Image (cartoon, rainbow, N blue to C red):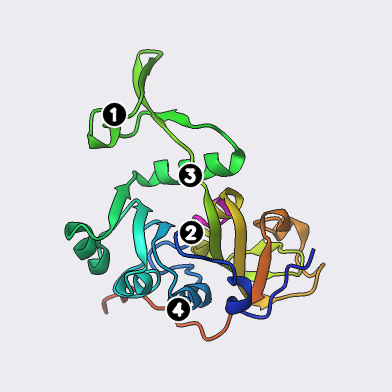
Amino acid sequence: MKKVYENAEAALFDVKDGASLMSGGFGLCGNAENSIRELARKGVKDLTVVSNNCGNAGKGLAMLLKNRQVKTVIASFIGGNPDLQQQMLAGEVEVQLNPQGTLAERIRAGGAGIGGFFTPTGVGTVVAEGKEERVIDGKRYIFEKPLTADFAIIRARYGDAYGNLRFYRTARNFSPLMAMAARVTVAEVDELVPVGALDPDDIHLPGIFVQRIYRGTDYENPIENRTVRPRA
């Protein structure tokens, strides 16, 4: 099975209107910049996006929001994302907020083929509305369903032709879980290395979870909030 594609346009050729999409990244850290730019260029719309916060400060996935390409966002945090806040308040985008750990576990459950799980997080709050509740060993739990998607777009530091990936530090975040939970995972990598160049013990995500891979270019790598240590 050929996995290496020339670029984002070739790798995302079959993303259509109404597709569901998981996108790795925490804020702007680890965003699949090339894939996001290509989706913006294609103009596909009515997307359901699963992401920690759907971009930030007009960058990352916020590009798709600005283009009015997103119908639903499943996320855990929307602070710092004025585009999403405005569209949510205007009723233009449906936002489903999840506690961050719950979001990660829902994605993991989707990739593992688990039908859901019980968690104490959110019990007695608006998060629990409409959800099954049980008492287990004297403690209240609510039931959360798994999340899957048509596509996952992720970014890694290194990858090979088999799709084996190694991420760069915290840019790893949700990406391995999303790759497992999507029908098609498209990975863009900073560097495409020969098969065998990655030590098996250094591989963060086995290639079995990656269907397409390409080398990304022209990264912006924006910093959301630059802070420096004050002088002594």
**Membership of 153 in magenta stretch:** no
Which circle's residue, 2 or 4, is located before the other in the chain?
A: 2
Q: Give the camera-side residue of 7 and 135.
A: 7
Name the residue at 34% across, 59% down: 71
Q: Secondary structure at mark 1?
A: loop
Give the labeled residue for mark 3.
Answer: 147
Badge 3 element: loop
Residue 196, label in figure? none
Dot in front, 2 or 4: 2
Position of 199 with respect to 6 (left or right) is right
Q: Which residue is mark 1?
A: 123
Discs 1, 2 touching: Cβ within 8 Å = no
Q: Which residue is mark 2?
A: 19
Main secondary structure of the magenta stretch? helix
- Mark 3 or mark 2, whichever is nearer to me: 2
Give percent across and percent down for residue 225. Answer: 30, 73
In the displayed image of the protein, which residue is found farthest to the front?
17
Position of residue 75 measured from the top left corner of the image (x, y, whole percent): 36, 53
Q: Position of residue 151 (x, y in %)?
A: 55, 59
Range of magenta residues: 173-177
3D distance between C-alphas at marks 1 and 3: 20 Å
Could you tell me which quadrant the C terminus lies in?
A: bottom left
Q: Amino acid at mark 3?
A: Leu
Q: Amino acid at mark 1?
A: Val
Which numbered disc, 1 or 3, marks the residue closer to the eye?
3
- Nearer the camera: disc 1 or disc 4: 1
User: Can I make out residue 71 in this image?
Assistant: yes
State the residue position of label 4.
Answer: 221
